[in-house]
Image (cartoon, helix red, strand yellow):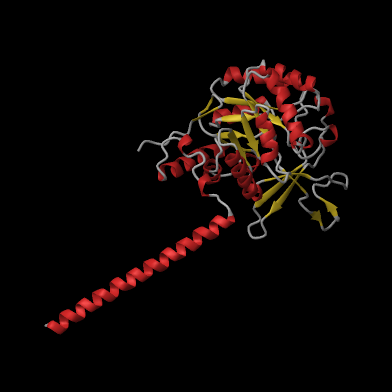
């Protein structure tokens, strides 16, 4: 068997591999995005941009880490960093140059705006003129801008999701992915609203609203800014089981909608699980921050090995293969009851066969 084909076509875009640098600090400017492309990443979702960056003011520190008690390894990562604070016009020049320098790499613009149709129309029109391949609508950032009805304040309300995605689809000439918040009870509700409005794909999950902990020396919450803090977005290995569940739910609900899976992916094995649950691409942000952009070679090699082991010739063959094995608890009970009955009958048949063989052997001995 030849080496598995890691490329995949998603909404008309050809990704040379499914590994996409997720929106956040790793995609903060053209220089680092170009570096990721040179190293072999299949695509990048840029750090979220808005029309007026002057309203974006970050603090320091803005990160907090949760470490394993056993190994001291970082397993959770909290972030209170806002969207990009770089001028919109600078981003427009950089995006245009990136597409000129890397025409075969998929460049996806993450955009966020206030709850106004004209603002969304403007950012879409101006950004797509740079030649970017798709949009990812940030309807899900959990911190920093809810007071302006941005980010999660939109994504937790399906009616607003539907309205905003509809505004974007009125003027967008390229694919549109809606990025979902995990901070809801039913992940399919905002996804359904977005799909109804014409979203071509769903990205999930964004970070989980969290408090990493309290510094027991100072008794102040982390990360501590002048003695105070705010809840932030939680990511890293610890969120992966939650992200997998959200991807599974949305993939089962909307089998014809493409999914970009996000949440705690650091290895090819992690990525494989998302793909088996319906993701067409996978995004990595915290993993790249902690382990470096160079992990891309390891990611591709490990995913290729898993595909070869299970005889998947191309990535599309692997997408969603594990979805049919989710069911209801009542069905699990019924299946287990049937299996136990089958094993019981099988054991009885085996016992009867054994008894028959002994009887034949006894008869033979008696006759002789």
Question: Residue 209 vs residue 283: left or right?
Answer: right
Which x, y percent locates residue 357?
Answer: 24, 74
Kindly identify the residue that appears in the image at 53 percent across and 31 percent down: 40
Question: Residue 351 vs residue 151: left or right?
Answer: left
Which x, y percent locates residue 255?
Answer: 56, 36
User: In front: 354, or 312?
Assistant: 354
Residue located farthest toward the left when viewing the structure as drawn = 368
Kindly identify the residue that appears in the image at 54 percent across and 24 percent down: 12
Kindly identify the residue that appears in the image at 48 percent across and 35 percent down: 316
Which x, y percent locates residue 234?
Answer: 72, 45
User: In front: 365, or 230?
Assistant: 365
User: In front: 44, or 295?
Assistant: 44
Q: Quadrant of residue 134?
A: top right
Give the quadrant of the N terminus: top left
Question: Residue 226 vs residue 305: left or right?
Answer: right
Residue located farthest toward the top when viewing the structure as drawn = 129
Q: How many marks?
A: 0
Residue located farthest toward the bottom when viewing the structure as drawn = 366
Give the quadrant of the C terminus: bottom left
Q: Note whether 28 is above or below 119 in the view shown.
A: below
Question: Residue 78 vs residue 284: left or right?
Answer: right
Which x, y percent locates residue 164?
Answer: 74, 27
User: In front: 90, or 368?
Assistant: 368
Kindly identify the residue that appears in the image at 41 percent across and 45 percent down: 309
Q: Note whether 59 is above or below 131 in the view shown.
A: below
Q: Quadrant of residue 193?
A: top right
């Amino acid at each position: 068997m030849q080496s598995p084909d890691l490329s995949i076509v998603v909404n008309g875009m050809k990704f040379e591999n499914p590994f996409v640098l997720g929106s956040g600090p790793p995609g903060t400017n053209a220089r680092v995005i170009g570096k990721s492309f040179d190293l072999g990443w299949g695509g990048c979702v840029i750090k979220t941009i808005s029309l007026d960056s002057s309203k974006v003011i970050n603090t320091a520190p803005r990160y907090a880490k949760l470490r394993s008690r056993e190994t001291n390894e970082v397993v959770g990562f909290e972030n209170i960093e806002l969207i990009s604070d770089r001028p919109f016009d600078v981003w427009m020049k950089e995006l245009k140059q990136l597409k000129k320098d890397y025409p075969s790499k998929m460049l996806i613009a993450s955009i966020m705006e206030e709850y106004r149709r004209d603002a969304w129309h403007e950012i879409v029109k101006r950004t797509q003129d740079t030649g970017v391949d798709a949009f990812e609508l940030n309807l899900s950032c959990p911190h920093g801008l809810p007071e302006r009805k941005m980010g999660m304040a939109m994504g937790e309300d399906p009616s607003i999701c539907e309205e905003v995605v509809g505004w974007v689809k009125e003027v967008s000439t390229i694919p549109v992915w809606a990025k979902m918040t995990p901070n809801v009870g039913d992940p399919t509700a905002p996804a359904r609203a977005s799909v109804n409005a014409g979203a071509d794909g769903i990205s999930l999950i964004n970070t989980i609203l969290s408090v990493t902990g309290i510094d027991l020396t100072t008794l102040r919450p982390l990360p501590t800014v002048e003695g105070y803090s705010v809840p932030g977005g939680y990511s890293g290995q610890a969120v992966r089981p939650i992200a997998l569940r959200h991807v599974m739910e949305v993939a089962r609900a909307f089998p014809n909608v493409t999914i970009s899976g996000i949440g705690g992916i650091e290895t090819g094995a992690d990525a494989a699980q998302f793909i088996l649950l319906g993701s067409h691409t996978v995004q990595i942000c915290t993993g790249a921050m902690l382990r470096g952009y160079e992990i891309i070679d390891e990611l591709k090699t490990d995913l290729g090995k898993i595909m070869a082991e299970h005889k998947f010739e191309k990535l599309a063959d692997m997408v969603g293969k594990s979805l049919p094995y989710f069911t209801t608890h009542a069905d699990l009970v019924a299946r287990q009851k049937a299996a136990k009955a089958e094993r019981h009958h099988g054991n009885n048949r085996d016992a009867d066969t054994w008894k028959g063989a002994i009887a034949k052997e006894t008869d033979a001995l008696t006759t002789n």
